[in-house]
Amino acid sequence: RHCPMVSVMAPESMVGVLAEAGSAVVSEQIPVPTIAEDEVLIKVAGSAVNRLDTLQRKGAMPVPPGVTNVLGLECSGVIVAIGDKVAELGWSVGDQAMALVSGGGNAQYVAAPASLLMRIPRTLSLAEAGALPETWLTAFQLLYMVGGFTAGMTVLIHAAGSGVGLAATQLARAGGAGRIIATAGSASKLETAMAMGASHGINRHDNDGKWAAQVREVTDDRGVDLILDCIGASYWEQNAEAAALDSTWVLYGTMGGAAPEGPFLRGLMKKRIRLCATTLRTRPISYKAKLVKRFSEEALPGFEAPLDGKDPFRVIIDKAFPLSEIQAAHDYIERNASTGKISIQVDTDQLGAPASAAGGTCE
C-alpha cells in the first residue's frame, strides 16, 4: 500500500492523550515528535487501548526510561517523514504501515522505529490494522518465543476473550495445537473464542472457580502442555492442577494479583513446571525487531490466506471510540465487558478512505 505524495510538513503541535490524576486526558498542545535517523513519522489513522494503557493511566505501570508519556502502544497510518537510514529498509513517504510503539500511539502523529513497522494486509482496514500490533505480537511471542509452542501441544489460554487471548487462539489453531482450552468470564466471550478455534470453553465462574477439574477431564487427566496466563496469583493453584508434567506456564500479567498464597513453589516443583514471566514493552528494540520480522514472515500472511486450510486470521474489534472519548474507552475496557480490541479512531479521513488509500490515489 503506497500513496505517491510529497513529504508533509507536520504541525508543531498535535492532539494526543496523557495520563493526569488517574484520567486519560486529551490535550491539543503536545509537541509533534521529532524522528531519529532510523525512525519514521506516522500520521496516525487508527490506534487502540490496551490493558497496559489503563495501568499506566492509574500510575500502576511506570513509563520506561526514554519513552514518551503519551499513551498508546500501537497504530496504523501513513508515513509522512522518514529518517536518513530508513529508505534502505524499504520504507518511503506515502507508505501505509502499522507499528508497534512503546508509547505515543494515541495521538495524531507518532515516531516509530522503522524496524517495528509492518505492511498492512490487503484484507484489513486501517482501523483493524491499528488494533493489531501489540496484541498479535504479544500472542506470537508468548507462544513461540517464550512458550516453545509446537504442533500437537495442548494449550490453556486464560482471558480468551481478550485481544491477546483471541490472537493466541487463532495462532495456536493455525500452528496445529492438539487442543486449545479457553477460559473466560462469560458465555459470549467463550463463544467467540470457540469460533476462533478453541476446542473447549470453560467459564471461570463455574464450580466456584475450580475450573482445573474440567481441564483434567477434557485432557483425559493428562493436563496441558502450555499455559498462557495474564491472571497470576488467584489462578496459581488451579494452573498447577491443570498443568501436565514438564509443562510450561507463561505469565504475562497479574490481573488476579501478584502475591500467591500457599505452597506455590512446591506446586511448580511437583510437576516440574517451567515458569516463564515475560513482558514486551520493556524489551529492547533489537528483540522487538526480531519478533516483528518473524511474525511478518510466519503469521502475517495468515490474514490474507488461511495457514491451516480453515480461516484467515481476524482482528476482533468490540467497539470503536473517537480519540476525543479516550476516557470512555478506558472505562469500557476496565469493566471487563469487551471481547477483542477497543479501537481508537484518530484520523477519520484516513479511516474512511478505501482500503488502499490514504491521502491520494494509491497503488
Image: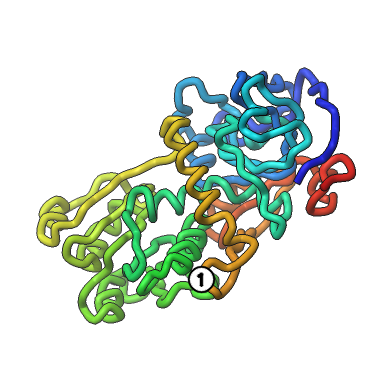
User: Does 310 appear above or below 92?
Assistant: below
Residue 96 visible, this orientation? yes
Residue 181 visible, this orientation? no
- Using the image as rendered, state which of residue 95 and residue 315 is in the foreground: 95
Residue located farthest toward the front when viewing the structure as drawn: 88
Q: Residue 302: x percent and y percent?
A: 57, 61
- Using the image as rendered, state which of residue 360 and residue 156 is in the foreground: 360
Q: Amino acid at mark 1?
A: Asp
Picture quadrant of residue 277: top left
- Using the image as rendered, state which of residue 354 and residue 282 is in the foreground: 354
User: Does 274 appear above or below 103?
Assistant: below
User: Does 27 appear above or below 173?
Assistant: above
Q: Residue 159: x percent and y percent?
A: 44, 60
Picture quadrant of residue 268: bottom left
- Using the image as rendered, state which of residue 214 and residue 329 is in the foreground: 214
- Residue name at image x 59 percent, y 34 percent: 71
Picture quadrant of residue 153: bottom left
- Residue name at image x 39 percent, y 71 percent: 180
Residue at the disc numbered 1 = 308
- Element assignment for label 1: loop
Q: Residue 39: x percent and y percent?
A: 62, 26
